[in-house]
């Protein structure tokens, strides 16, 4: 027996220490609920558990992100719902304004309401926000998409406007003979009329049997208007009109020369309309299948001085040259003036800028009483950049411009440019410009299309020429303005350049009387004269805009947006830095300009009709955007559901690794606790066992 080392007590103490540690760990697990409280508890399990915790907490926040995205979408959709309601109201107003029963004041009242709606659409686009982020002003747009869609809508609208204008012209075709005499006919109905028309050639005379409508040119006039008209009629018949016809024949000999000696009559109508600024106009209508009717109308209310003084005569003469140029083109280029292709009328008519521009080229676009070019703000001191800007402010179009500047001013410059290029592109002198314009008209008379002629002399087809003229023609316009200065700028008038009269008027047409001129002889007894030609010839001659072959639209004209351009909002719906975890939300600019309704104008019946289409395109854009938002919201809701499912199942997996099995641990704890108590008892016994040595000593 030894007492230096109490090995039994040491063993009991060691075992007790182990059991005490077990009891402590079991108590910790039971109190914390986790079976991993430190890395030593389960090193591998801790690593796996922490990865799962990162995923769970990230996915939980991703769910919040997606729910925020849903809120953002709902705010945008709610605002667009109101925009859509305003557009629907705007559509109602446009349809209402397009009705012919409205007075001008009614349409202005409708326009006032539309203007308020446009302003409110802009306000909604500016102020709709989520967490200080603008939603509808383009901040969240998809780069370039809005501008592209607007360009597509503009192209569609251009086509609709052209068709509308062509369809509208059908309303003015009236039958003058047969069972349908006096009735308005469609193009198809007119094309179905029996008979053939005439073709003019040098070999054949073009003498026509003239028949007036026996309505006095002065019918309906009284007082001072009748006095002025009576005094003016012989001046028109014996001087101004014959001089204008002679001047046009001399200028365009290759195109119109074969008409020399022809007996073509034109009716005369003297009227008074103080509300109109029109001084004179020429009308053309169809008689039987081999006849054309002509009419020259003169507005007494716009003619302030009779007898004519130098200035008023110049103004009237330049207007008559312009209008008689229309009569020549109606007679010689009938297909292009009516759009007749294979008997189908209004199908492929010359653009209005060419019709009016050529008349301006003959009569003058810079005459002191004819302010069209000055209306563009162009003069000999204008820079090329300023000229380009001015032209682009009133660009050429295929369907015509309600303002007139595009057709008369820009049309004049474009027609003169075409003549300049046809003559070689070297000189803007009157003789060279006349020669070039005659070349252009002669080629079209012989059947070439305007599209083909433009391609030949400018390198661009009709559509592209219309788009690019502002840039490509600027240097020419600069030369032309320097040459013309304050003259008429008309190739068929007497003063192409500097005025010759002391009072500032230009010497427009030569004085004196021209006798025995049968070509476009002015009737003194009828307001309309129908010219019936010999049977067997087609009067529909000359090329059309494209000869019915059509033309390419060229590239889309995409204008840079004035609104903020963003890259959408990326809703992060995952835990990794992966683009697959981002749901991109795009909202294009929804202001009035971006939607194309800032130009909605209902102050005339025609503008209201076109505005219906503008609003329709805007409604389609808003509906498409709302559909996209709705689809995105549905996706986000599915995303939230999926994220919640992943979080739930990942949490369950992490729980298997980390959480304490309370029942199991309680059993283990109770077992360890009993062993601890037993160990303590045995340690006490072992400590007492050494006291037996004392009996030996005693």
Image (spheres, rainbow, N blue to C red):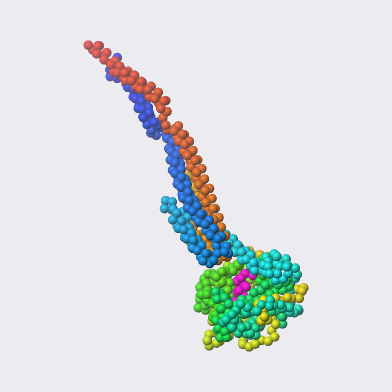
Hey, which quadrant is residue 471 in on the image? bottom right
Near-viewer residue (382 or 179): 179
**Residue furthest out toward the right:** 536
Residue occupying image coordinates x 29% and y 18%: 684
Left or right of 336 in this view: 85: left
Hey, which quadrant is residue 494 in on the image? bottom right
Left or right of 287 in this view: 481: left
As drawn, 679 above or below 153: above
Q: Main secondary structure of the magenta part?
A: helix
x and y, in percent, of residue 264 in the image: 70, 79
Residue occupying image coordinates x 50% and y 47%: 633
x and y, in percent, of residue 28 in the image: 36, 29
Q: Quadrant of the N terminus?
A: top left
Near-viewer residue (182 or 583): 182
Taking the magenta stretch, the answer to whether it contains residue 23 is: no
As drawn, 268 above or below 395: below
Taking the magenta stretch, the answer to whether it contains residue 351 is: yes
Q: Which residues are magenta?
A: 348-363
x and y, in percent, of residue 507 in the image: 58, 85
As drawn, 335 above or below 613: below
x and y, in percent, of residue 204 in the image: 76, 78
Residue occupying image coordinates x 55% and y 87%: 501
As drawn, 407 above or below 661: below
Hey, which quadrant is residue 412 in on the image? bottom right
Visible residue check, residue 390 = yes
Near-viewer residue (201 or 477): 201
Residue occupying image coordinates x 23% and y 12%: 697
Q: Quadrant of the C terminus?
A: top left
Near-viewer residue (29 or 334): 334
Visible residue check, residue 433 = no
**Residue furthest out toward the left:** 698
């Amino acid at each position: 027996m030894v007492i230096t080392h109490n090995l039994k007590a040491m063993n009991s103490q060691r075992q007790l220490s182990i059991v005490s540690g077990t009891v402590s760990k079991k108590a910790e697990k039971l109190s914390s609920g986790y079976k991993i409280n430190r890395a030593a508890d389960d090193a591998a399990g801790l690593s796996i558990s922490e990865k799962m915790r990162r995923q769970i907490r990230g996915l939980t926040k991703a769910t919040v992100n997606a729910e925020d995205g849903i809120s953002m979408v709902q705010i945008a959709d709610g605002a667009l719902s109101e925009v859509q309601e305003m557009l629907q109201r705007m559509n109602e107003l446009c349809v209402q304004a397009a009705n012919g029963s409205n007075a001008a004041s009614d349409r202005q009242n409708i326009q006032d309401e539309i203007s308020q709606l446009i302003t409110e659409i802009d306000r909604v686009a500016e102020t709709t926000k989520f967490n200080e982020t603008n939603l509808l002003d383009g901040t969240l747009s998809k780069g370039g998409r809005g501008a592209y869609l607007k360009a597509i809508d503009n192209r569609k609208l251009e086509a609709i406007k052209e068709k509308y204008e062509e369809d509208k012209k059908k309303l003015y075709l009236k039958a003058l003979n047969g069972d349908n005499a006096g009735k308005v006919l469609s193009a198809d109905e007119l094309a179905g009329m029996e008979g053939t028309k005439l073709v003019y050639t040098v070999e054949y005379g073009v003498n026509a049997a003239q028949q007036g409508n026996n309505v006095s040119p002065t019918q309906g006039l009284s007082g001072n208007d009748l006095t002025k008209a009576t005094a003016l009629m012989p001046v028109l018949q014996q001087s101004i009109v014959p001089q204008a016809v002679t001047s046009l024949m001399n200028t365009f000999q290759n195109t119109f020369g074969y008409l020399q000696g022809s007996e073509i009559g034109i009716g005369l109508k003297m009227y008074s309309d103080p509300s109109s600024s029109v001084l004179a106009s020429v009308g053309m209508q169809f008689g039987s299948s081999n006849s054309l009717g002509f009419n020259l109308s003169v507005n007494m209310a716009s003619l302030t001085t009779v007898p004519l003084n130098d200035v008023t005569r110049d103004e009237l003469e330049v207007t008559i040259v312009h209008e008689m140029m229309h009569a020549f083109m109606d007679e010689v280029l009938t297909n292009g003036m009516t759009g007749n292709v294979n008997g189908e009328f209004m199908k492929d008519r010359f653009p209005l800028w060419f019709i009016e521009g050529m008349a301006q080229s003959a009569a003058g676009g810079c005459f002191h009483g004819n302010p069209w070019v000055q209306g563009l703000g162009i003069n000999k001191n204008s820079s090329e950049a300023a000229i380009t800007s001015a032209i682009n402010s009133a660009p050429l179009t295929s369907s015509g411009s309600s303002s007139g500047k595009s057709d008369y001013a820009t049309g004049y410059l474009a027609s003169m440019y075409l003549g300049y290029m046809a003559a070689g592109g070297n000189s803007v002198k009157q003789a060279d410009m006349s020669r070039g314009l005659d070349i252009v008209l002669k080629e079209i008379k012989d059947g070439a299309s305007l599209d083909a002629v433009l391609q030949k002399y400018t390198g661009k087809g009709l559509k592209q020429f219309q788009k690019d003229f502002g840039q490509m023609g600027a240097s020419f316009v600069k030369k032309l303005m320097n040459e013309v200065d304050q003259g008429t700028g008309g190739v068929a008038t007497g003063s192409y350049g500097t005025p010759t009269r002391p009072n500032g008027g230009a010497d427009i047409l030569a004085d004196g009387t021209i006798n025995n001129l049968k070509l476009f002889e002015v009737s003194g007894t009828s307001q309309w004269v129908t010219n019936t030609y010999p049977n067997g010839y087609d009067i529909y001659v000359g090329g059309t805009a494209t000869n019915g072959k059509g033309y390419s639209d060229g590239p889309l004209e995409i204008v840079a947006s004035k609104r903020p351009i963003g890259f959408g909002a990326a809703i992060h719906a995952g835990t990794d830095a992966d683009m697959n975890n981002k749901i991109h939300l795009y909202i294009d600019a929804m202001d009035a300009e971006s939607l194309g309704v800032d130009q909605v104008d209902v102050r005339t019946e025609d503008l209201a009709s076109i505005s219906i289409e503008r609003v329709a395109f805007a409604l389609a854009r808003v509906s498409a955007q709302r559909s996209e938002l709705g689809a995105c919201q549905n996706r986000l809701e599915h995303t939230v559901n999926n994220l919640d499912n992943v979080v739930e199942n990942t949490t369950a997996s992490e729980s298997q690794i980390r959480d304490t099995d309370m029942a199991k641990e309680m059993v283990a704890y109770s077992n360890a606790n009993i062993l601890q108590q037993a160990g303590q008892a045995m340690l006490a016994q072992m400590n007492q066992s050494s006291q037996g040595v004392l009996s030996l000593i005693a």
